[in-house]
Amino acid sequence: MKASISKIESFSTTDGPGIRTVLFFDGCSLRCKFCHNPELWQKKEENIELEDLLEKIRRWKPYYQKNGGITLSGGEPLLQSEFIIELCKRLKKEGIHIAIETSGIANHKIEEILSLVDLVIFDIKGTTKKKLEEITQRKAWNQVEEFKKKLIQSKKSVWIRQVIIPNVNDKLENLEELKEYIKEIDNIENIELLPFHTMAFTKYQELNIKNPYQEIPAMDKQKCKDLENQLLEERKETH
């Protein structure tokens, strides 16, 4: 069994707890205007065998220690569901912690994947149908809502992430909408508001892809952190 994986980052400390190996799966059906990995939109030729990937992971396993592990990212990893399921089954036998970072866009077998992972990093693209479909340039609301429903039913540990973009979703009303959107999700362990940046702009030029946000500046990191702290404080008061 093979997968299409664009990049493997062997020592990440920002994509889940502890030291992690991050697998960036090719392919994504969304076209988020703020995407910083447009090179992963198209699924490329399958380039890595399951056994070869497991052998690499075994070599890195000593670095994971108690709380590290594997993070499945992309692109959208759920679109390569068959490979993900087999990989997760093997990782469970190895006793390796599994996180998956997803926007909730999947073909099928969501429940089975959720049953195998330990942590879901849920990327919130938009907190209303209008905002999500404006940002992703796709009619994706129903799919994401179905995923969210299954995520709630799974009782899995969850991290919430949302990219904050100047003059798009950086107002206090966005905090209220986000707070309302995630209130039904159990076991939220962490919330991260990520500042929009312009480092990927050169990728759009190199790939000859129109950049919808080319006139938008990078998000002020301190303002983004202040919004995050305010959201965390408000959640603490109501939980």
Image (tube, rainbow, N blue to C red):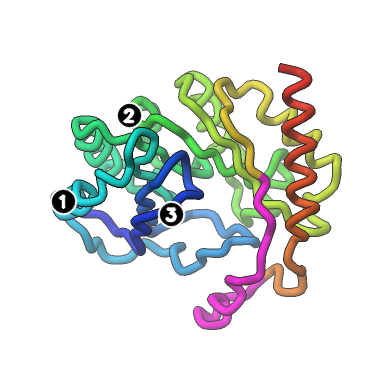
Figure check: 64 above or below 164: above
Pick the front one: 132 or 8: 8
Figure check: 225 above or below 148: below
**For the residue marked with disc 1, what is the amino acid?**
Glu
- Residue under label 2, please give it: 116
- Residue under label 3, please give it: 74
Residue at 25% in and 31% down:
95
**For the residue marked with disc 2, what is the amino acid?**
Leu
Q: CA distance from mark 2 to mark 3?
A: 18 Å
Give the magenta-colored segment's residue range: 193-211
Figure check: 88 above or below 223: above
Residue 160, image x, y percentages: 59, 37
Upstream in sequence: badge 2 or badge 3? 3
Q: Is residue 84 left or right of residue 72?
A: left
Q: Is residue 205 left or right of residue 164?
A: left
Q: CA distance from mark 2 to mark 1?
A: 20 Å
Residue 32, image x, y percentages: 60, 58
- What residue occupies the far right of the structure in this picture? 172
Pick the front one: 192 or 122: 192
Q: Is residue 197 a member of the stretch shown in magenta?
A: yes
Q: Is residue 103 a member of the stretch shown in magenta?
A: no
Query: How many neighbours does mark 2 have within 10 angstroms: few (below 14), some (14-19), or many (20 or more)?
Result: many
Residue at 60% in and 24% down:
185
Which secondary structure, mark 1?
Answer: helix
- Residue under label 1, please give it: 55
